[in-house]
Image (cartoon, grey):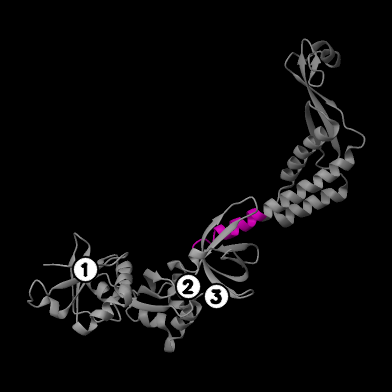
Amino acid sequence: MNEEFLTALAAIEQEKGISKEVLFEAIEAALVSAYKRNFNAAGNVRVQLGRETGSIKVYTRLNVVEKVTQPQQEISLAEARAKDPEYQVGDIIEKEITPKNFGRIAAQTAKQVVIQRIREAERELVFDEYVDREEDIITGIVQRVEQKNVIVDLGKTEAVLLPSEQMPQDEYKPNERIKAYITEVRRTTKGPQVHISRTHPGLLKRLFELEVPEIYDGTVEIKSVAREAGYRSKIAVYSKNRDVDPVGACVGPKGVRVQAIVNELRGEKIDIVKWDEDAKIFVANALSPAKVLAVNLDEEKKVANVIVPDHQLSLAIGKEGQNARLAAKLTGWKIDISNESQVTPVSAQEEQKVYFTGGVDEESETS
């Protein structure tokens, strides 16, 4: 090894953050393997790389024994004491066996080790950078589509957008910029693997944090999010500052803030509702845009019995139960919706109720 190589190691330490000592130890371990491979050595070998000079020395390590049975690995006690009378059985003697032409092999091996370590260090730096961004939003460029998986270039690495994490309305074109939510970062032999999502509720939350300064600075707080990606979402917001309208802040002047998010989500409808610590008020708000006449809570069963005007029943339920289903996800309450006429005295055969949960809605007739 020459001075130029040592200078290169110092530069790598400074630029890549890889300790020179780590590189030295890795090179020494690789040189042991290279020596054994090229010189058919089976014994215990140690390679020493000079930290200051770059000199390379190969030593065979011999066990001191009474009688030698393996000449490549052992030395007799008598021969050892001829070198130093202090040697005892079980001691180890090192004998230099550096081959004359080992420098060329060493240089090639060292180069390979350094390149490998640099790649490993760069992968680790990339992993550390993106693992810290889990549950955060990121912008990437669509590279290609492989078996319905969308590969997105993040700059330092690539991310995978699985079919299950893609929105129904999304069409991915090469070189198109998209925003996505980082769900997981994994270590692999080929480097960090970043998984992203366009359907995760966290994406909606992060988009509002980007678009609404009052959320970013903490004036407005997002309490909960319910989403059916590509179709409709509900988001509950709250502000401790009575002078700040949390819903108005999220909508923005002439709706520009929420419209920017709708555009990013390819036209997904977004209901922004005001959160309230009173569950009755919160449930009523969550069923927006429907108007609610009354809410009665069954705390034990976690059911909210909601009464709406007759003409608002279909609006409260929503298309295929979507509005009520999202309201249930948003509030955490199972919602039982009845229209106004159902709460007046009617025959048992006429009374009907529709139940909605955060999952599947159920229809049942009660007698």
Camera-nearest label, 1 or 2:
2
The answer to whether residue 44 is seen in the rendering is: yes
Q: Main secondary structure of the magenta part?
A: helix
Q: What residue type is labelled 1?
A: Ala
**Mark linked to residue 168:** 2
Mark 3: give few (<14), some (14-19) or many (20+) Cα within 10 Å: few
Q: In this view, does 281 lie above or below 32?
A: below
**Mark linked to residue 171:** 3
Query: In the figure, is residue 31 to the left or right of 298?
Result: right
Q: Nearer the viewer, residue 347 or 262?
A: 347
Q: Quadrant of residue 346?
A: bottom left
| Residue at 11%, 67% in the rendered image | 367
Mark 1: give few (<14), some (14-19) or many (20+) Cα within 10 Å: many
Provide residue 329's location: percent of width, then percent of height. 33, 67
Give the Cα separation between the discs numbered 3 and 1: 39 Å
Q: What residue type is labelled 3?
A: Glu
- Please, which residue is most extreme toward the front here? 349
